[in-house]
Image (spheres, grey):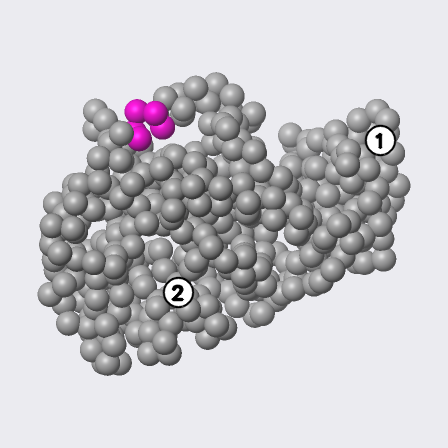
């Protein structure tokens, strides 16, 4: 189906509905899931689904119900993980630590229900508060020690500011401390290579940076591999068994799956392919999520203005964090206005005709953040609307607010 044909088909899907709406193409989700799972299956690992990139229980369940290699969720807050456990998800890893007793108690209570809700730690204070909560509730809270895999050279830190644990001996020292802390149990290690998995290296908005970014990835990979392997060898030397070793993300799933010491790889945004994930060299995915705005003005020949659209993504401010017009093909944003909260003007190319009331479909930069703006996702399969499912927001959940 050409983009023009897709626009005409999707235009009919929203013809009788108030705009804006968000749509998820399940056929594209299936294709993306198969693409991301392929290297994971070949390596005999499991694929953990990142909730932050979907924020929709129905889609999380849809992926997990596919079976192996899909297993477990990675969440971003204790309250979210506990809520997911209440809704039948029995393996949730909280990927960000907490030092608040209230959060720790939420995790401890979730583990009393039969679910395994583990939480990342990288500081003795994290162990202390989780241990206190575990003892209070009569459980051992599973903890996952996070190692920082950032690339450091000549005093420069290239990567996300995450764990302070960088050397294998630091990680293993905290593992030893966890083993000695009553109220927690050692569950595994996480080593997320954010500077590889989350850095676009085929970005049309900053083409001069693509070459240096690919070089950075190439230079940093051997160090990440050695770092994680040394940690795994230290765990084996301690006689520990049954631990998980998590790594990766959508942007590095092919490479990370090949690393022998890892037991699982995480992916999230790639299942729906928000537009940032078009910009990874060698990663081909299919756009699966979009939102439709209504054309409400034609201010000049060759221009239209849509209602709404100011769904700008988090992170370093840049044009790649802004939604991009997708259907009909050829529309472009205006540099002076971009996407506004209540209006988004567009330049219309020759040969494209848009009437007042027509929809324009956009792709968000970051997949999960779109769910903060929509109460439901309308699911599409075979060009037809097949369901409408609530997002976290539609279920009155706002875990960071």
Q: Quadrant for residue 93, please give it.
A: bottom left
Label 1 secondary element: loop
Label 2 secondary element: strand
Left or right of 8, for residue 34? left
Between 230 and 289, the one nearer to me in the picture: 230
Residue 198 position in % (x across, y down): 43, 38
Magenta segment: 217-221
> What number is the disc on residue 134?
none
Q: Quadrant for residue 378, please give it.
A: bottom right
Instruction: Name the residue located 34 percent from the left edge and 45 percent from the top edge.
Output: 247
Spatial CA span between label 1 and label 2: 49 Å
Q: Earlier in the sequence, mark 1 or mark 2?
A: 2
Residue 85 position in % (x across, y down): 43, 71
Q: Which residue is mark 2?
A: 91
Q: How many C-alpha atoms fall within 10 Å of the one at disc 2: few (<14), some, or many (≥20)?
A: some
Instruction: Name the residue located 77 percent from the left edge and 36 percent from the top edge.
Output: 1
Instruction: Name the residue located 36 percent from the left edge and 60 percent from the top edge.
Output: 94
Between 189 and 305, the one nearer to me in the picture: 189
Q: Which residue is mark 1?
A: 352
**Chief SS of the magenta region:** helix
Residue 140 position in % (x across, y down): 23, 72
Between 225 and 174, the one nearer to me in the picture: 225
Magenta-drawn stretch contains 127: no
Instruction: Name the residue located 32 percent from the left edge and 39 percent from the top edge.
Output: 259
């Amino acid at each position: 189906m050409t983009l023009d044909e897709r626009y005409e088909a999707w235009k009919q899907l929203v013809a009788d509905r108030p705009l804006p709406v968000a749509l998820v193409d399940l056929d594209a989700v299936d294709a993306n899931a198969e693409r991301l799972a392929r290297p994971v299956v070949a390596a005999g690992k499991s694929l953990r689904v990142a909730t932050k990139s979907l924020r929709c229980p129905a889609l999380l369940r849809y992926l997990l119900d596919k079976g192996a290699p899909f297993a477990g969720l990675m969440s971003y807050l204790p309250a979210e993980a506990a809520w997911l456990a209440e809704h039948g998800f029995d393996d949730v890893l909280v990927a960000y630590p907490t030092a608040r007793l209230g959060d720790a108690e939420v995790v401890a209570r979730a583990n009393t229900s039969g679910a395994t809700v583990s939480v990342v730690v990288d500081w003795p204070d994290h162990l202390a508060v989780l241990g206190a909560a575990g003892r209070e509730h009569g459980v051992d809270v599973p903890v996952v020690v996070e190692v920082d895999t950032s690339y450091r050279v000549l005093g420069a830190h290239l990567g996300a500011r995450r764990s302070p644990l960088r050397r294998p001996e630091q990680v293993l020292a905290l593992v030893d401390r966890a083993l000695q802390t009553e109220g927690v149990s050692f569950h595994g290690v996480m080593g997320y290579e954010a500077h590889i998995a989350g850095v676009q290296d085929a970005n049309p908005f900053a083409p001069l940076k693509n070459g240096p970014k690919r070089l950075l990835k190439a230079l940093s990979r051997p160090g990440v591999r050695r770092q994680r392997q040394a940690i795994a060898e230290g765990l084996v030397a301690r006689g520990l068994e049954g631990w998980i070793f998590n790594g990766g993300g959508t942007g590095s799933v092919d490479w990370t799956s090949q690393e022998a010491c890892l037991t699982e790889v995480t992916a999230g945004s790639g299942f729906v392919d928000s537009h940032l994930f078009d910009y990874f060299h060698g990663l081909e995915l299919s756009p699966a999520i979009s939102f439709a705005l209504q054309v409400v003005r034609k201010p000049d020949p060759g221009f239209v203005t849509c209602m709404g659209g100011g769904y700008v993504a988090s992170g370093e401010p840049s044009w790649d964090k802004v939604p991009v017009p997708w259907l009909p093909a050829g529309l472009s944003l205006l540099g002076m206005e971009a996407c506004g909260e209540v209006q988004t003007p567009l330049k219309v190319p020759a040969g494209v005709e848009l009437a007042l009331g027509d929809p324009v479909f956009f792709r968000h930069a970051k997949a999960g953040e779109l769910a903060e703006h929509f109460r439901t996702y309308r699911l599409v399969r075979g060009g037809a609307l097949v369901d409408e499912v609530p997002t976290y927001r539609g279920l009155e959940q706002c875990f960071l607010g």
